[in-house]
Image (cartoon, grey):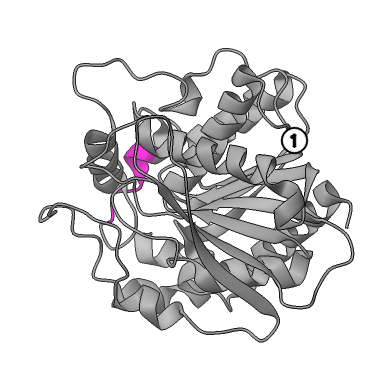
Amino acid sequence: MTFRERIHPQLRAWYDASPGFDFDHLEEFVPKCNAAELANLKEDPEVSVRDEIIPGPHGAPDVKVRIYEPREKQAQPLPCLFFYHGGGFLFGTVYRQEALCQRYVKNVGCMVVSVEYRLAPNWKTPAPLEDCYAALLWVYENADTLGVDREKLAVSGLSAGGNLAAAMALLVRDRKGPKLCLQMPLYAELDYTLDTPSSHEITDEKVWCRYNCEKSWEKFLNPGKMPDQYDAPALAKDLTGLPPLFSYIGQLDPGRDENIAYWTRMMEAGVEVEYHVFPGCYHCFELSVPDADYSQAAYALTYAALRRAFGR
């Protein structure tokens, strides 16, 4: 069976049209909107959106955050979801998943704070994670002004952003920072060693594949420095005391096995875990073909998990 034949029929048209990802002609990256992101910037009458510039980590640049909240004034403080966009640590902005952040607001009834974390190759780890932590502290310290419920904070991200969500759960625990009620790292980049069956299995360059993973980690990690659990959460030895986890991944994702292994270890450590594996689905399937049956199922499960965590 060819790789294309393994793909769910509703996802094949996107696969056929995909040019793949060009990692061989990377220039110096700066956060900026590309054409696809600009096309995503559609106003929703139910969602208020604004950008803020907040203090960055000590000695580092300020951080842009994009805040989404219900346009209608809320009587009670809102739960807050911190969101970290995907892009292999190399590209993307707070505008990258604009429509998704708006849907979280409408379907969950929360505020979303999307973080413009620093990108590789200009910035190596731990710069992106420290930006995310700075945003968490800023919201927590300004919760009364922002209208945020300090007891209902969650983190989520896609792919590289999923790495940051998982790493944030570890970092918040270890620094004894503001308590999180849910971590939601979706099809996360967790293990730089790329030594699982799925990381060797998925090599078709029309989708996110082993080669892309190799380039992503190569440009994100510091040369000559051994990665730690905050760089690659799969390295974490102790997974106790972490917030509940919700996640999903496609069966045809190179990160499938490292995610399943991480979720399994988390359950063994006593953490509450819910995860789903969608057959015939490649990396970012729900963003690529949002109307597909499995994409709709993934979104519905995500909203439900957030509502439970937030007590909505």
Looking at the image, which residue is at 82% across and 50% down?
310
Q: Position of residue 219 (x, y in %)?
A: 22, 38
Q: Residue at (55%, 40%) from the top-left corner?
A: 165
223 magenta-colored: no
Compared to residue 90, the image places residue 43 above or below, namely below
Q: Magenta stretch containing residue 200, yes or no? A: yes
Instruction: Please state if 218 lies on the left or on the right of 255 as rendered.
Output: left
The C terminus - image quarter: bottom right
Labels in figure, total: 1
Q: Position of residue 5 (x, y in %)?
A: 41, 66
Q: Give the labeled residue for mark 1.
A: 244
Q: Position of residue 295 (x, y in %)?
A: 60, 68
Q: Which residues are magenta?
A: 199-204
SS for callout 1: loop
Q: Check the image and report above or below for 251 versus 207.
A: above
* Residue that appears at 78% across and 78% down: 72
Q: Quadrant of residue 152?
A: top right
Look at 43% across and 66% down and name the residue there. 96
Residue 8: tell me if it is visible: no
Q: Nearer the viewer, residue 256 or 188?
A: 188
For the N terminus, the quadrant is: bottom left
